[in-house]
Image (cartoon, grey):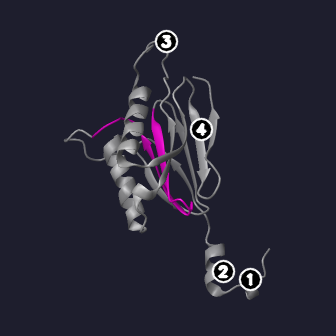
Amino acid sequence: MPDMAAMPESRFSAWAEAATVTVLHPGDVALGRLGDRFETLLGSCVSIILTDPRRTVAAMCHIVHSGAAPVDERGAETTHAEPALAAMFDLLQGCGISPQLCEAYLYGGGNMFPSLFKQSHVGQGNTDWALQALADLGIRLRGQDIGGTAFRRVAWTVGPGAPEVRLGEA
């Protein structure tokens, strides 16, 4: 335990600030800072994590559908990829982070019904969209675990380490 009396007030405040754990559900978009933790469960959905190169700020989303939201859909529009990515950009820019300078991680996109869908499936469409969007934006993909027939539990604490992925059985 550090000697609190010897720490400058500003350092103590940063040290004492509690980290948060955010569990993302379909359509969620969240912002975290150093020490905050993100967790999610993915099947055919995908999750994109964007983090600044120093790993001090990050945004994560849980995308259900590739592409844009239908015009008449309002409440949960970040279940769609384009509004989710735009929301992540807004959160990062609000912290003074340029999203185009971030690095990305991509997870999910599994085929949860391999006996029904042998070729193209929702998960493939989601990963194809995410990979193309990141490439079009010039965002470097630092890591990925996509496709297959297993669901994934993804967890990451904002900082220097890589996200943790545990595979389950479909």
Label disc, if present, on residue 4 of the rendered structure: 1
Name which of mark 2 and mark 1 comes first in the sequence. 1
Whether pointer 2 and pointer 1 mark residues with C-beta atoms closer than 8 Å, the reply is yes
Label disc, if present, on residue 12 of the rendered structure: 2
**Vertical position of residue 3 compared to residue 87: above or below:** below
Let me know if residue 48 is in the magenta part. yes
Image point (25%, 46%), residue name: 74
Give how far apart the Cα atoms at labels 2 and 1 are. 7 Å
Give how far apart the Cα atoms at labels 3 and 1 are. 59 Å
Give how far apart the Cα atoms at labels 4 and 1 are. 37 Å
Packing grade of label 2 (10 A; few <14, some 14-19, many >=20) is: some
> Disc 1 on helix, strand or loop?
helix
Give how far apart the Cα atoms at labels 3 and 2 are. 56 Å
At label 3, the amino acid type is Ser
What residue would you read off at disc 3? 115
Horizontal side of residue 150 vs 25, given as left or right = right
What residue would you read off at disc 4? 153
